[in-house]
């Protein structure tokens, strides 16, 4: 059983990006520039955005953080997006979600120039991904595909079961894994699926992204399966300093012994997302997706 | 076994549209207006576009046909699209594919205002469909979903196998059938799929859109299955006046006796596409997708 090390893989990807930034600097090129828009003071959002800014510094990107209070109007936020769209120095930007209830997230995301939408949430990027055209792929699916590639996991003709049909995990994973060149036969399962246990037990590859802690049990997985765990649930623990621990959608101790490859939680898919965002920003600054 | 009558269902949908146009006229509203751009003299394209113009007349829409010779430049065509985008009288328009090799189809389609893209090919409409947001759904998938709805075919929790991952049939069908409210468990199969026969034999619903004549045989289908045949292959025949006949991806005589529902070829999915295009144009004129 190979434990897929997302933390290490993310560090490798980030150091590759950092090396490329050094080359760009040495050639007098433009330093990639990521901007982040943060609304309000949600603890999780603060942490995520701080991590993104820090990661930019680490790889040598320029970063800008724009903050608004919770009471910012939708019009003000749309105006901010318009300014970032037209700011030629900004290669990519994100608007950290969730937004306050009085603002339409979908409207804000659709107002982003798809060519700067390094989160890959804009309909144009989703539509291009579906068509197999160059697109910014969102962080979690991008990170998973990168792990599969770097661990040389065979995908062609493999039966793959994706559990959960969310717009940010299950749905894009089902699309990417069944694309030409990846070539899995993908079954997308969800809350209305019958006989999920039997369906999972036939799978060569399982992507668990339904958001239910320790849902995937040992008897749902066949010997030699590849298991990708995208769940993160925070539970109380008396064994950690913080009093909390993170657990995934996979009952690791039961499932891991049967697997050929498995991602742990934490330290699997999670750490890849930040590297994915940086990579998209680099692609954007090199005009590799939108010419 | 119920034979799904696409011709009749298309006529019903078109007469519903025609009734709505009469109401719009009586209320002094704006008559829906569909424009079609045809490049060159390809026989198939000529026939399709003529059929679309005729259908517009039948339901009381205004229609405009814009023709170019094969040697039209990409710039000229993009300029035509820009004019149609800004023409307030035009509710929706299509650029008939295929285009000559010197013109990028993708570039032309991406230049269409998504709010007038009644073919549903623009990345924004595909991306919105994926996200479950209001979108123009392209004609074939829309037509199939309409047949499933009007024949009250149960979908929730059903195992569905889609054969073929094309951007215009298999891929969007896999997305639509697995969406919330439809709730099939969808397996998307393609040329690299192993054990396709066994996978199909477990399916409650099969959508065959791979483009190989009479591919789906009797022994690949379980009793009581629903079979949707999206294939059209033209073969020589000495039994028809024209010397040609159309056959689908399903070996009808073997498969039909086992089915609860099946679409014939011709007369199944095919006739629905024109009604779908008209319906999208009506939606556009009512600003029901893009406000």
Image (cartoon, coloured by chain):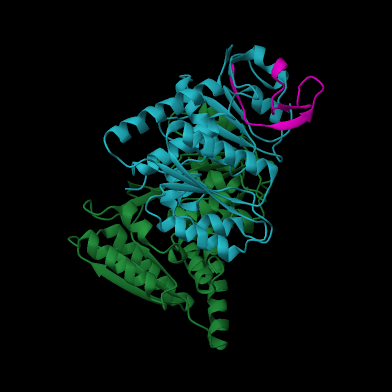
Chain colours: A cyan, B green
- Viewer can see residue A178: no
Residue furthest right in the image: A238
Q: Position of residue A150 (x, y in %)?
A: 46, 22
Residue B176 included in the magenta stretch of the image: no
Of B194 and B264, nearer the camera is B194
Q: Is residue A202 above or below residue A139?
A: above
* Magenta-drawn segment: A225-254
- Residue A189: quarter of image: top right
Q: Position of residue B6 (x, y in %)?
A: 53, 58
Q: Is residue B228 above or below residue B79?
A: above
- Residue A215: quarter of image: top right
Of A149 and B6, nearer the camera is A149
Residue in view at x 51 percent, y 63 percent: A79
Of B85 and A34, nearer the camera is A34
Residue in view at x 54 percent, y 38 percent: A52
Q: Position of residue A167 (x, y in %)?
A: 59, 44
Residue in view at x 76 percent, y 27 percent: A242
- Is the C terminus of chain B in the top left, top right, bottom left or bottom right quadrant? bottom right
Residue A243 included in the magenta stretch of the image: yes
């Amino acid at each position: 059983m190979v434990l897929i090390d997302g933390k290490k893989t993310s560090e490798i990807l980030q150091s590759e990006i950092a090396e490329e930034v050094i080359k760009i600097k040495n050639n007098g090129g433009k330093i990639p520039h990521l901007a982040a828009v943060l609304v309000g003071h949600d603890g999780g959002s603060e942490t995520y955005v701080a991590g993104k800014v820090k990661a930019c510094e680490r790889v040598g990107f320029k970063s800008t953080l724009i903050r608004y209070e919770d009471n910012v109007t939708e019009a003000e936020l749309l105006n901010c997006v318009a300014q970032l769209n037209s700011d030629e120095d900004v290669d990519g930007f994100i608007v950290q979600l969730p937004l306050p209830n009085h603002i339409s997230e979908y409207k804000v995301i659709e107002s982003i120039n798809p060519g700067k939408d390094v989160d890959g949430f804009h309909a144009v990027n989703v539509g291009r991904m579906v068509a197999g055209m160059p697109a910014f792929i969102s962080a979690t699916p991008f990170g998973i595909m990168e792990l599969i590639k770097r661990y040389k996991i065979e995908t062609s003709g493999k039966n793959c079961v994706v559990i959960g049909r969310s717009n940010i995990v299950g749905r894009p994973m089902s699309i990417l894994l069944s694309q030409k060149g990846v070539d899995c036969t993908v079954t997308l399962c969800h809350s209305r699926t019958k006989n999920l246990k039997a369906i999972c037990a036939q799978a060569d590859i399982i992507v668990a992204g339904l958001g239910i802690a320790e849902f995937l049990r040992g008897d749902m997985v066949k010997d030699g399966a590849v298991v990708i765990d995208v769940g993160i649930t925070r539970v109380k623990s008396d064994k950690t300093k913080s009093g909390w621990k993170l657990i995934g959608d996979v009952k690791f101790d039961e499932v891991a012994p049967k697997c050929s490859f498995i991602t742990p939680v934490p330290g699997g898919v999670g750490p890849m997302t930040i590297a994915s965002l940086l990579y998209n920003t680099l692609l954007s600054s090199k005009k590799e997706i939108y010419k």
